[in-house]
C-alpha cells in the first residue's frame, strides 16, 4: 500500500484530503504543522511515497518542506497545492495544483504519481 503524507495548516483541508485518500486505498499521515511532518519523515525516511503540501504555511512553506523532505529521501514525489497561480522559486519543478481544486482532479493527479 502506498503511503502519503499530507500537510496543510488548515485542519479542515487536511481532513478532507486525508479522508479522500484513505477512501481511495492509500495509507495517509496528516499534519497541520510542517515541522512535525518533517520530523515524521526524518524518523521514517522510507515510509512515504508522496508528499502533498500546501504552499503557504507558518513556520515552513511547502517548497521548503518539500526540499527538506527530498534531502531525507529523494524518491518521495511532491505535489504542492496553492492559491497562487505561479510561485517564484520552484527550482525543482514540483507539481503545483491550484486551489480551489476538485477532489476528483486531486485524486487523479495523486493516482498518476503513484500508479
Image (tube, grey):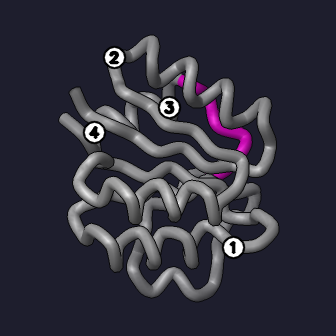
The mark lying in front, picked from 2 and 4, is: 2
Side of 29 relative to 99 (left or right): left
Which of the two residues, 33 or 10, is positioned nearer the viewer here? 33
Per the rendering, the mark at residue 105 is 3
Q: Earlier in the sequence, mark 2 or mark 1?
A: 2
Per the rendering, the mark at residue 39 is none
Label 3–label 4 contact, CB within 8 A: no
Q: Is the residue marked by circle 4 packed among few (<14), some (14-19), or many (20+) residues within 10 Å?
A: few
Residue 29 colored in magenta in the image? no
Label 3–label 2 contact, CB within 8 A: no
Which quadrant, please, contains the N terminus?
Answer: top left
Q: Secondary structure at mark 1?
A: loop
User: Which residue lies at the image location 45% right of the left edge and 86% below the top edge?
Assistant: 91
Vertical position of residue 2 compared to residue 72: above or below: above
Question: Could you tell me how far apart the alpha carbons at marks 3 and 1 are, in whole angstroms?
Answer: 26 Å
Which of the two residues, 2 or 115, is positioned nearer the viewer here? 2
Residue at mark 2: 25
Vertical position of residue 56 compared to residue 98: above or below: below
The mark lying in front, picked from 3 and 2, is: 2
Which of the two residues, 40 or 68, is positioned nearer the viewer here? 40
Q: Earlier in the sequence, mark 1 or mark 4?
A: 1
Residue at mark 4: 112
Q: Secondary structure at mark 3?
A: helix
User: Which residue lies at the image location 76% right of the left edge and 72% below the top edge?
Assistant: 59
Per the rendering, the mark at residue 60 is 1
Name the main secondary structure of what is drawn in magenta: loop
Q: Is the residue marked by circle 1 packed among few (<14), some (14-19), or many (20+) residues within 10 Å?
A: some
Q: Which residues are magenta?
A: 98-103
Residue 85 in percent (x, y) is at: 68, 64
Amino acid at each position: 500500500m502506498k503511503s502519503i503524507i499530507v500537510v496543510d495548516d488548515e485542519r479542515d483541508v487536511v481532513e478532507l484530503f486525508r479522508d479522500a485518500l484513505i477512501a481511495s486505498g492509500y495509507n495517509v499521515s496528516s499534519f497541520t504543522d510542517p515541522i512535525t511532518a518533517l520530523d515524521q519523515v526524518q524518523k521514517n525516511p522510507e515510509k512515504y511515497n508522496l508528499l502533498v503540501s500546501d504552499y503557504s504555511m507558518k513556520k515552513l512553506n511547502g517548497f521548503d518542506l518539500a526540499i527538506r523532505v527530498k534531502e531525507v529521501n529523494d524518491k518521495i514525489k511532491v505535489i504542492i497545492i496553492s492559491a497562487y497561480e505561479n510561485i517564484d522559486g520552484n527550482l525543482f519543478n514540483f507539481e503545483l495544483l491550484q486551489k480551489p481544486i476538485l477532489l476528483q482532479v486531486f485524486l487523479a493527479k495523486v493516482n498518476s504519481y503513484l500508479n
